[in-house]
Amino acid sequence: MNPDLNPAPSPGLVVTRFAPSPTGFLHLGHAYAALFAHRAAKSAGGRFLLRIEDIDQGRCRPEFEEALYEDLAWLGLDWESPVRRQSEGLADFTAALEVLKRQDLLYPCFCTRADIRAEIEAANGAPHLIPTGPDGPIYPGLCRHLTGAEQQQRIESGTPYALRLNMDKALKMAGPLTWTDLGKGEIKARPEIFGDVVLARKDTPTSYHLAVSVDDHRQNITLVTRGEDLFAATHIHRLLQKLLDLNTPAYHHHGLLLGDDGRRLAKRDKAQTLCELRKSGLKTLDILHMCGYV
Ligand code: GLU
């Protein structure tokens, strides 16, 4: 167990979480996911936690956070206090980055999006040949081979940089990995599909993947339930768990609710937000019904 990130696990107890980002109002799809996690915990006599994923300070708004507490309470959910807010846990993410740095698994990347695009286009020619992972085009490795002196010089000149994982090195260090998915069985982790993933962004000293992996451990989550749109992310989360010596929860990636047009619901679909549905006179039971729980 990594002493920098040491939790106190309670063996046997199911602990789930719902981890919304307050970048918009919750919609019916969030209701489905929150109820799914709550039910998974309560039906096993376990604990349900709420986590506010607010590291993207440019897009998060206090009014969205306020509204989500109201929406979740309206759904009849209860959660433990205090609620973990990721923006208050930056020291944990810095400690995790230090652990990776000590293993020489991170490198600073000074590239802009335009640099990356130009390099990929030059290397691949046709757009359909561009290697793409779950987070977008695979990083072509421009900054991977900078010398220590070159890195230092750019850092000192004030060029903003992200921290990327050296995937080849990380894979060698971690060896083969699997995780248990309650919906899909034993899954072989394939973190290589991400390439040299960003673990600390230029504007934020962490990233979604790092913050989720650390926080699931910190909060002793034993079962991560979330939509299957995040299935691929688990490949990288599993690798980070291994490299950082974090607990590995079980996963249950559930199906997504679709709108009338057959597309998945998004925060931009105003009519389906829980506050709009509530204002239109719907009751909690109607939402449970729309989510297929009754
Ligand atoms: N914060 C993420 C979202 O709102 C969910 C993260 C997770 O469940 O792992 O999409």
Image (cartoon, rainbow, N blue to C red):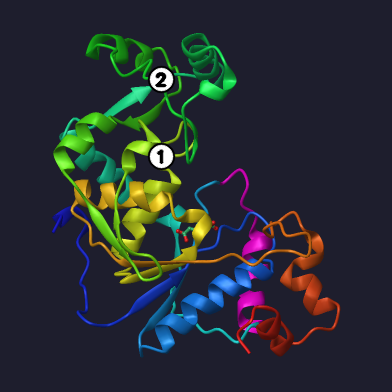
Q: Nearer the viewer, residue 55 or 146?
A: 146
The reply, left or right, for residue 74 in relation to residue 189 is: right
Magenta range: 57-74
> Which of the numbered marks, if any, corresponds to residue 41?
none
Q: Residue 82 is drawn in which quadrant?
A: bottom left
Q: Main secondary structure of the magenta part?
A: helix
**Nearer to us: label 1 or label 2:** 2
How many discs appear? 2
Give the residue type that dot 2 points to.
Pro
At x 22% / y 57%, what residue is drawn? Answer: 246
Above or below residue 166? Residue 71 is below
Q: Give 39 or 79, whichever is nearer the viewer.
A: 39
Q: Determine whether, in the image, residue 273 is placed left or right of residue 243.
A: right
Crowding around mark 2 (Cα neighbors within 10 Å: few <14, some 14 to 19, many 20+) is some
Of 90 and 213, the residue lying toward us = 213
Residue at 24% of width from left, 11% of height from top? Answer: 147
Disc marking residue 205: 1
Residue 71 on the magenta segment = yes
Q: Secondary structure at mark 2?
A: loop
> Mark 1 near mark 2, Cβ–Cβ under 8 Å?
no
Residue depicted at x 36% and y 88%: 44
Q: Position of residue 185 (x, y in %)?
A: 32, 66
Q: Which mark is residue 140?
A: 2
